[in-house]
Image (cartoon, coloured by chain):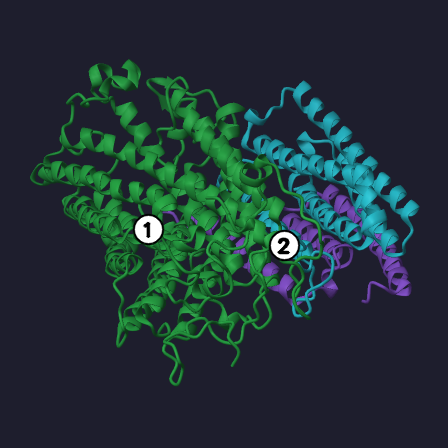
Amino acid sequence: MTDETSKHGSHKQVEGVGVVTHAHVHHDELSWIRKYVFSTDHKTIGIQYGITSLLFLLFGFTLMMIMRWQLAYPGEPIPWIGSWFGPDNAPDGIMLPEFYNQLGAMHGTIMVFLGVVPLAVGAFGNYVVPLQIGAIDMAFPKINMTSYWVYYIGGVTMLVSFFLPGGAANSGWTSYAPLSVIATMGQTAWLIGMVFLITSSLLGSVNFIVTIIQLRTNGLTWMRLPFFVWAQFVTAFLLLLAFPPLEAAGVLQLMDRLAGTSFFMPSGLVVSGVPLTNSGGGSPLLWQHLFWFLAHPEVYVLILPAMGIVAEIIANNTRKPLWGYKSMVYAIIFLGFMSFVVWAHHMFMTGMGTVISTFFQTTTMIISIPSIVILTAFFLSLWGGSIRFTTPMLFALAFVPMFGIGGLTGLPLGLAPADIHLHDTYYVIGHFHYIVAPGTLLALFAGIYYWFPKATGRKMSDLLGKLHFWGSFIFLNGVFMPMFIQGLAGVSRRLYDGGQQYAHAQGVLQWNEFMSISAWCLGLAQIPFIINFFWSMKRGKKVEDNVWEATTLEWTATTSPPLAHGNFAHIPDVHRGPYEYSVPGGSRDFTPQNERA
Amino acid sequence: MNIPYTSTARPDTGLYNAKLGIWLFLGSEVMLFGALFSSYVLLRVAAPAWPHGYELLNIPLATVNTIILISSSVTMVMSWASLMLKQFNKYKMYMGLTILCALAFLVIKYFEYSHEFIEGRFPSTSSYLGLYFTLTGLHGLHIVGGIIVNTYLWGPGSKMWQTDPQRFTNRVEVAGLYWHFVDLVWIFLFPVLYLL
Amino acid sequence: MNPDHAEDIKKSVRKYIVVFVALMALTVVTVAISTMHLNVKAAITIALVVATIKGSLVASYFMHLISEKKVIYATLILTAVFLILLMLLPVSTYLDRVVH
């Protein structure tokens, strides 16, 4: 992504009275390394996060596509690439259970921590937030750069773990003790990788919060912020305060694995007939508490930026203000807060008493309310709108019912009695994937199609975009809808043969092949996107600065791409709310945020 | 490119960026140590038996360490106050004292740990000792971090006093906030691990 | 406190000395009480009360929290709420567990 306008930027000096752009006169040209590798510019860092996370998403998805072969055809040699995995993982190309578990644990870890969050927060947040608030960069550009490279190191650590003796981590992305404590070396690499990733996340979240509080331009009051910025703001608080307990837990698990402590190891454990010699007295549930204290807010980290993106695109493509902006803001703040009080609904089956399980069940039911408020607001925002079915809008529209399904299927899981039957079954996998895959991922694609013209000055092809959309939408449902059927039948998750050995699973096993074929077709459906993404960078249709005729500052106050140095020729002042579309009496059907009253 | 409010306060919040940043970071540190304290609570409540600190650890030595660390907190805030009073030499003295106190703390910790190891008491020996070593070890790592930052601000970093005194003073204030927090953690660690 | 006024700083320095003396005294107190080997509940309560007082002094005066801005207070209150949840709920879950 080259910035041909950077030369223009360096010549635009201090403009009129009262406008501060550059305080210096001379601008040294940075070396290639300082400009594109170790850059402190939020736009470059955003793109670095974007490309890296998309690659990790593709890799994590590939792991699943390989797993789905085993689930569809248990015991059959993996075609074409079966010999690549070596005799330790897949002798004669037939996947061993240990390898399946590695693929499973790493699929979850990579998708959540290396894929979705870096894309949603690191890429979209970094690129768009400063532009939307009229800032020349994030508050701490060097910390921003550090945050990316620490993420990169964490990612490399995770990838390298596949090549350790015993392979990668294989105790689920949840790394429950005591299994994770006695697991192979890959688990240590997982823990070290997590320490890096958590550090990256903490640096980033401090940056986002300070930037949004301190660097909003004149006139940009809290209730004039684009909903996308609110979403990133709340998300940053979740990351800031929820991650440290997992970091602590990671340290404790490293101590258990490497120093022989027993924080999570109960007394009297016998492994393969041999009693363990550690001191015992530890609590596996302690790990679960500390893990889920993070991991529950983490799932809101996965969804909040997506809601922010969908909000922007729906307002823009209905040509009317978002319905219930204020309610949505209060809802998202309440949602962020509540996300810290529900975590043990992941632990209903651990021998919990009725008092505590009632508490967590209640908070879990309460937390569904703000989500419903936001979803309803999206839905009502469509009413009476002049809907433009642009490619971003297709993805954003699909988000609404898909997130609806994901959210509604969560309700039985949050109710302890129903959870007795559904816990650790495919129903759970279906529930959370509906939210993250047809939910968040579709929203992230929407964001890519939406902001690609801003970052490059060119539009992505609508034809390829629509192919990508329909293929993804159809096959995402194909993969995940049958999971509810299997889950309700009682098929457990994390079974390397997809439930073949269980009598209660026999009636629903035929869905495995269907889901696998859907998954592979889903993979094929991404090809138009990959081609589109790279081809359009160089050959996409060149478009004007505000191609979507949007109201927010990133569209109305900067070029496409934005000026490399300082983003704005004139730092904009804000005079109105973020979604002034179709204002009565206006000459156009949108009024930019920085247009005077 | 000048980011606004790096040295001067933003009018409506009354804060400069790094001050807000460090308090947010300290919030996350509260959750980090809080999780370890929470682990301590759970493991101790669930344990059939739990040793007293005075049975296994050297209370007088740890008390000395507590006094040293609190003193370093005073010298740290005095170093910032000296900069506010434009007394750079006094700043150097107080910051130097802070670093020395911190090093002394680590030396005493070294003696504490080696004594435990000689007595055959390791993190793996019991839940109590596991928590003791992990909690004080993580705290010790934070002290090391503080020493590195403070040494930088005492040495090569102090050149900024010539070019941008306001920004340098803010840096020392921010480093001070971190250092006081490290002291604060110890104020809770000391009684919990040694005295109860 | 206007940081530009030397008088204000000098007043603060006096406060720092007072707080330092108080912290020393409280350290002596908490160690002395611990030698009395009270029952566990009393020992924990007293130790935590003293520690909280000491911590509050460090936070209020060394960290200037007593005259800080609303944004900082809001962040800390939010953190405190989550910290309390993290301290109370895991052990409560243990205490409420099903025991056969």
Q: Nearer the viewer, residue A393 or A287?
A: A393
What is the number of the mark on residue A580? none
Q: Which residue is mark 2?
A: A11
In the rendered image, the vertical position of residue A324 relative to residue A27, given as above or below: below
Q: Colour of chain B?
A: cyan
Q: Three-letter amino acid code at disc 2?
A: His
Image location (x, y in percent) of residue A327:
40, 73
Q: Which residue is mark 1?
A: A460
Image location (x, y in percent) of residue B47:
50, 37
Q: Nearer the viewer, residue A594 or A543?
A: A543
Image location (x, y in percent) of residue A475:
18, 46
In the rendered image, the vertical position of residue A149 relative to residue A93, given as above or below: below
User: Going 58% across and 49% down the picture, which residue do you hit?
Assistant: A7
Q: Which chain is purple?
A: C
In the rendered image, the vertical position of residue A41 relative to residue A107, given as above or below: below
Q: Are marks 1 and 2 on the same chain?
A: yes
Secondary structure at numbered mark 2: helix
Q: Nearer the viewer, residue B172 or A397?
A: A397
